[in-house]
Amino acid sequence: MYFIADFHIHSPYSRATSKDMQLENLNRWAQLKGLTIIGTGDFTHPRWFSNLQEKLEEAEDGLYRLKPEYRAIGGEEVPATCRKDTRFILSAEVSCIYSKKGRTRKVHHIIIVPSFAIAARINAALSKIGNLNADGRPILGLDSKVLLNIALDASADTLLIPAHAWTPHFSVLGSNSGFDSLEECFEELTPHVYAIETGLSSDPPMNWRLSGLDRVVLISNSDAHSPKKIAREANIFNTELSYRGIYGAIKDKDRTRFIGTIEFFPEEGKYHYDGHRECKQRMRPSDTKHNNGLCPKCGNKVTIGVMHRVDDLADRPEGVTPPGTIQYRRLIPLAEIVAEVYNVGVGSKAVENTYHRLLTTLGDELSILRDVSIEEITRVSSPLLADAIHNVREGRVSIAPGYDGEYGIIKIFDTDDKAKTREQIVLL
């Protein structure tokens, strides 16, 4: 079965997360986006864990769905063109902050499990180490290798995946507090790490530059803190709809079952370039090296971004495609495309109305972005919007890269192109 999954999101109990991240809203937005499977996020939080147990019921092996009385909430807001049965998979993110080999390490991990019983075992073990009530993403003084051991003790079928693996401050390979390899982090347990999450600021070709990552699968998830952000990155499977099907496709790195990822343009991610946000300094790695790692405006240290960090650890040049790679596709969220076309804010009523009209006519968001013909999009919207989606599919965009916690600024049209296309619309 062909389906799209987003494993990494957060609940309302995580810091800086929307209170709208309730299961009923996630069920609705998964349908609007085109997801079949979405992670629950935050199963380590006691109140969210209880909420999950109350509202979910077993579906296929290791997957859950909302009980009928909750499934009906907001169902009328999903167009008939988008309706499908959403499945939930139990997931959480854990922040490990600890000292190893004389350095402070700060590494985030995604944990995915096939049952509430296994999640409960992990929660019981982690509750002895730190306060799980404090945050949906608990911060624990725990070595990553020990966390992996706890996860595997709960069940050999648990997946532990390093989250946003290149983010400077909180990741396994990050420039500020990570390691130089998976082996340095997990030691003899490294063979039990079957995947890493590339994060918004890197994409598969960047990761292909490290031969040490050839063994693992590169997965992509939204890390969403609000419902509208789910599926901005996701994973495409063609396998049995079950935990076992997903687990096997990832563990075996089977390109016939795990067939691809949906990616941000990595330049749009918040840590792609080096830089210093306070001084609005965006810097290429070469600029940073030339300036000895210091901000040219204030002289403080800059944050070393993902592009620079990959370059430091890479043992291959850019452009190498190792054997066994899984396909990927870069996209821009539909609301962002509509906002640029109409020159309004992404949260405006005009964008919301256009977004829902497109979904009602053409189907879910990911289908519109990837599959619906440009001719059909033109027929129900405008040549300018159709042209914008075509440009994104072809990778014809310009981006001022993100840096030091600032998202990149992405443009599909330059001013002249947009003016010409608008002129053509008026003439038509």
Image (cartoon, rainbow, N blue to C red):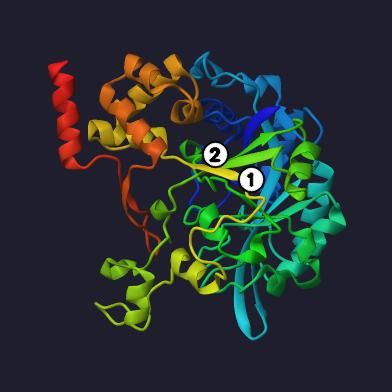
Residue at position x 38%, y 71% in the image: 285
Q: Quadrant of the C terminus?
A: top left
Q: Would you place residue 17 above or below residue 206 in this image?
A: above
Residues tagged 2 and 1 counted as in contact (Cβ below 8 A): yes
Q: Is residue 87 left or right of residue 11?
A: right
x then y, percent, for residue 29: 53, 30
Q: Is residue 315 left or right of residue 427?
A: right
Query: Which residue is denoted by mark 2 in the rendering?
Result: 21
x then y, percent, for residue 164: 56, 57
Q: Would you place residue 167 above or below residue 254 in this image?
A: below
Kind of residue at badge 2: Met
Q: Would you place residue 287 above or below residue 62 in this image?
A: below
What is the CA distance from the residue labelled 2 to the residue labelled 1? 10 Å
Residue at far bottom of view: 102
Kind of element beneath mark 2: loop
Query: Which residue is denoted by mark 1 in the rendering?
Result: 41
Quadrant for residue 357, please give it. Answer: top left
Kind of element beneath mark 1: loop
Q: Residue 125 versus residue 281: which sits nearer the camera?
A: 281
x then y, percent, for residue 234: 57, 41
